Structure formats: structure tokens, C-alpha cells
Amino acid sequence: MEQLTGWLTAAEAAERLGVKPATLYAYVSRGVLGRRQSPSGQSLFDPAEVERLARRGRPRQRPTGASEVVIESRITALGADRPFYRGHDALDLASSASFESVAELLWTGELSSGPRVWRAGEAALRAGRAAGAALPGKVLLLDRIQAVVPALAVTDPLRGNLDPGAVVDIGRALVAGIVDCLPAPSAGAGSAARASDAVVSDAGSAAQTGGAGFAAHGADPNAPGQAVEDSIAGRLAARLGAENRFIDGIRAALVLLADHELAASTLAARVAASVRADPYAVVAAGLATVSGTLHGGASLGAEALLDAVADPADADETIGLLLRRGERIPGFGHAVYKSGDGRAGALLNRITAAAPDHPVLRGAEALIAAASRRRLPEPNIDFALATLTRAAGMPTGAGEAIFAIARVAGWLAHAMEEYERRTPLRLRAVYIGPQS
């Protein structure tokens, strides 16, 4: 194991460079400065490399690839192959923590230990389900979520309360409302989802306060005492038609996808929050962006890739055809994790544990092997998510829906930081057009 004795902590490296910690981590993400993780997950920096950078002065080169915006944040740091949520290794959290507890960690900085059931009120569920019912039958799940969120919002007359506690309450009920407004599957696990409808309706009736049908401002429906079927992961599994053996994989996916620093959808959410948009509008801004094929929508392409290798022997030909057409291999490679996305391996291990002999896993393994033979990038979390949805028999587009539901936690955490700043996030352009 590499010896890291004498290496600098983030605070020490930032002090030597005369920058804030956020700027230090921006140097890391741009490849200007290397970083290692101690066994405890602490970021450490090579003192010689820091000294060279200090003598050279602040880097001025323009970053390659995606344009970058640097914003100070206490929420998520990106390590060599994984994110850290407020100092907690996301892969460690994915081993056993509930999505609810990780969301609370992102929102409050505290990892809650006691289980709690998140519920939305009856009026909110009626409005959300009515909005979903008005859509065509074959609409993708993410499109349904985008229609449901505004309907949930209008049932909450106190949505303009941006105090931290109020935002946390909204977050709990909003996630619950999104999940419980998804349509029940037509067969298989449909009975479980319909049973969930009855439980949710009863809880929603009890939770109503005043004229608002949304439970965001009453703690009763979120009281401790949670069976796995009552968890967000369990209810989402029922809505997506997945067997109970895949609930743990869904839980792990939600945890691993809960936040990822300043991803495109998170930037959109922060911009909305910076001008005092309410939490529902913040989530709507995130949803509008997360559907992009280079973001949360990437799992949709990975699902199609897995469908193309029902026979694992077709993996080489499938990848070869994409390469000949000059297309990206969906679900492979990551802009941040150049040496591999650790989240992918963590989730694939969960799927293997649940269904070790599943044919979808054989196809996934064949694709990974074919990509490796061509020295293509490693699989990322989108590929692992697509493997989960296909192995569990979920509908097409389930991956991007899971991604979006998970990321609501991160969007609201970042929104709370912007609410604290009380300054609009105003980006500036460098004009390169014609001069008069």
C-alpha cells in the first residue's frame, strides 16, 4: 500500500496555495493537482506537488472538455473514483444506509440512525395522480415525474418557506409524492403497488393539516418505524414492478446517485434557488436538465445496449457497430473518474448478489469484456443502473427515473446552500461576437 506519511491535508494544502478549499478541489477536478485518499477517506496531497504549484502561481489554463464553474460547497467532494457526501464515502453508505438517511445527511449534515416513513398528503397524491393520468399511456417515467412535480407543488400553500427545516419537510414529502404517484404496474408486482396506494391514502388522510393536502409541514406521516416495503426503495420497487430481491439494489442506486457535486442539473437547481425559486421549482429546474443524454438520460441508451445483447455472443459485434458509426458507447467512461467509476462496481455487485445467474448479467459481463478488449473506458454508474433495471424487469426508462428521484436529495441540499447565500448566482459570458 502506498505510504502517505507527511502528505498534506486539504486545509494545509489550501493554506500553502493561498486559496479556499473549494478552489483546491477545483484544481483536482481539472487535473491541475493530484489527490489521494487515506484509509479513512481523508483527502491528502503530495507536498512536493503542492509546492511546485505554489511557486508556479495559480493555474490559468483553460480547462479542456466541459466548461467549469467553481462554487464553494460543503455537500459533496469527488474522490478518485467515488463521491463523498459531507465527508462520508458514498460507497460505504451504499452498503447499508437507507436513501432516507443519506438524504437527511445531505440536507442537515447528520446521518440519521432511526428509520422513518416519508409520506405525502392525500390532496397532493390526488393532484399528482390526476396529472399523471392525463398523460398518454406510453410516456416515459421521467416525463411523468416532470408533470407530477408542479401538481404536487400547487397543493402546498407554504412552499415559499425557504427555512432549512421547511425545505427538509418538503423534500421528504416531495420524494414520497413522486414515488407514490408513479403508475402501478399492470401485472406482477401490481398488487403490491395497489396495496401501497391504500396505505399511502390512509396515511395521507391522517396527515392532512388545514386546507393543504401536502404532508410537508406535518411531521406525523414521517414518524419513525419503517419496514423495507415502506421505504422509498421498497415503494419504488413496487411501482417499477421489481421483485423484492431487487429492493436492496434500488436502495444502493438511490444512495450512489443522491448527489454528484456540481453536475449540470445541480447547477440548474442552484441557479433557480439563488433567485429564491421555491423547492418544487428548484426540482423542476433539475428535472429539465437531468433528462439530457449526457446526464441522467444516459441509462436509457445503456438499456438499449443491453437489449441488443440478449445473446452475450453479440457483444463484440454490437460494440463494433457503434464504433464504426462513430457513436459513444452508452454507459462507459466518465468525465471525472478517468480510471473507473467505483459506483458502477458497487451497484453491479449488489445486482449479482440478488440474481447471480440472471441472463442480463451475462450480457453485461460480455459487454464489459468486449469493451476491455478494445481498451475502451470502464463501465459507469449509468451502465450499472441499466443492468439493474433490465435484470429486475422494470419498464424502459426506469433508470433515468431512479436517477432523478435520487438526485432530488442533492438538488435540495444545494438549494439550501443557495438560500443561505442570499445572492443571485449570476454567470458572465465572454463576448466573442462582432464588434460595432
Image (cartoon, rainbow, N blue to C red):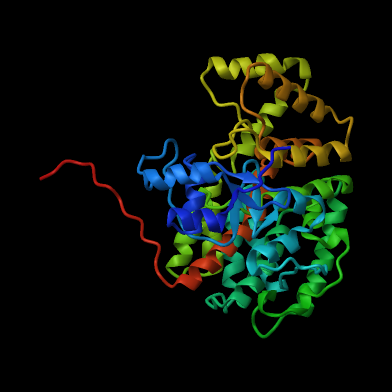
Q: Quadrant of the C terminus?
A: top left
- Residue placed at 66% from the left, 21% from the top? 371
- Residue placed at 89% from the left, 33% from the top? 356
- Residue placed at 51% from the left, 42% from the top? 48
Residue 359's quadrant in the figure? top right
Q: Position of residue 210 (x, y in %)?
A: 67, 85
Q: Position of residue 265 (x, y in %)?
A: 52, 51
Q: Position of residue 223 (x, y in %)?
A: 80, 75
- Residue placed at 89% from the left, 45% from the top? 245
Extreme bottom residue here? 210
Q: Does residue 158 appear anywhere in the picture?
A: yes
Q: For this view, does 385 lie left or right of residue 286?
A: right
Of residues 1 and 396, the one drawn nearer to the viewer in this rendering: 1
Of residues 231 and 132, the one drawn nearer to the viewer in this rendering: 231
Of residues 42 and 397, the one drawn nearer to the viewer in this rendering: 42
Q: Does residue 392 appear anywhere in the picture?
A: no
Q: Is residue 126 above or below residue 318?
A: below
Q: For this view, does 250 lie left or right of residue 18?
A: right
Of residues 222 and 133, the one drawn nearer to the viewer in this rendering: 222
Q: For this view, does 96 lie left or right of residue 333?
A: right
